[in-house]
Image (cartoon, grey):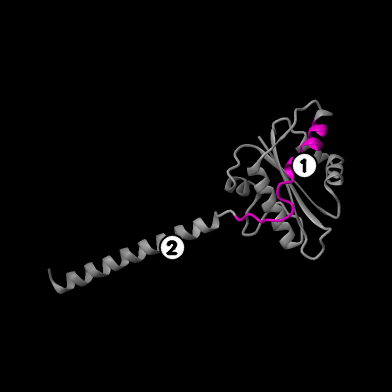
Amino acid sequence: MTAEKIEIRQADLNRRAWIKAAGLAALIGLAACSTVSVPTGQGAGVSSSATATLASLRATAGLGPLVPDAQLEQAALQQAGYMASRERMSHTMGWGKDFASRMKDNGVRGAAAENIAEGRFDQQKLFDIWAHSPGHRRNMLDPDFSRFGLAYVRDGRDPNLRYWSLVLGK
C-alpha cells in the first residue's frame, strides 16, 4: 500500500469515527429531550380526593365514575409545575411540547383531554368552576374517558395561588 493510499484510508477512518461520534451525540441529545421531569409539591396525590366529586358530576349525566391513574396524574403534575414555574396557564410546555407529546412521554395512549386553572381556590370551587364551563364540563363528562389524574402546584410567591391540571383519558 502506498503512502498516499494510507493517508486516504486514515482520513476515511477519521471521518467515519467523527460521523459515529456525531450520531451518538445526537442520540444522547434526543434521549435527554424525551426525559420526563416530574415536579414535586403539595399537589401530588390529590387525584383520590377528587374521585367522589367527579363521580357525582358524571352520575348526573348517567355516566360511571372515573378511576384515578398514576400516569395521568404524573402528566397533570408536570403541567401544573410548568405553569407555576412560568406563572401563567398553558396547555403546552417549553421547547414546543404540546399536550399530545406530553401524553406520549408519559406512556398515555388513546384519547385524552386536559382542564387547567389558576386561582386562589380549593378543589371544590375548582370543580364548580369547571362544571359551569361548557368545554371543561364536556371533557369531564366524555363517556370515552375512564381514568383521570389531578394535580396542582402552588405559586412560589403566593402560597394561596395554585396552578391546577386535570388530565382525563381512556
Q: Which mark is residue 124?
A: none
Q: Position of residue 58 (x, y in %)?
A: 80, 31
- In the picture, measured across the screen, residue 72 lies left or right of residue 18, that is right
Q: Which corner quadrant of the image does residue 53 belong to?
A: top right
Q: Which corner quadrant of the image does residue 143 belong to?
A: top right
Q: Does 2 sit above or below residue 20? A: below
Q: Which residues are magenta?
A: 37-58
- In the picture, measured across the screen, residue 107 lies left or right of residue 139, that is left
**Depth check, front residue: 48 or 39:** 48
Looking at the picture, which amino acid does disc 1 mark? Ser
Helix, strand or loop for disc 1: helix
Q: Does 60 sit above or below residue 69? A: above
* Disc number lying in front (1 or 2): 1
Helix, strand or loop for disc 2: helix
Looking at the picture, which amino acid does disc 2 mark? Ala
Residue most toward the top? Answer: 62
Q: Residue at x 77, y 41 (%)?
A: 49
**Depth check, front residue: 68 or 128:** 68
Q: Which mark is residue 49?
A: 1
Binning the other alpha carbons within 10 Å of mark 1 as few (below 14), some (14 to 19) or many (20 upward) gives few
- Gap between marks 1 and 2, in whole Å? 44 Å
- Quarter of the C terminus within the rendering: top right
Indicate which disc, 1 or 2, sits on the residue closer to the N terminus: 2
Binning the other alpha carbons within 10 Å of mark 2 as few (below 14), some (14 to 19) or many (20 upward) gives few
Q: Is residue 47 magenta?
A: yes
Q: Position of residue 19 (x, y in %)?
A: 36, 63
Q: Which mark is residue 25?
A: 2
Q: Position of residue 79 (x, y in %)?
A: 69, 53
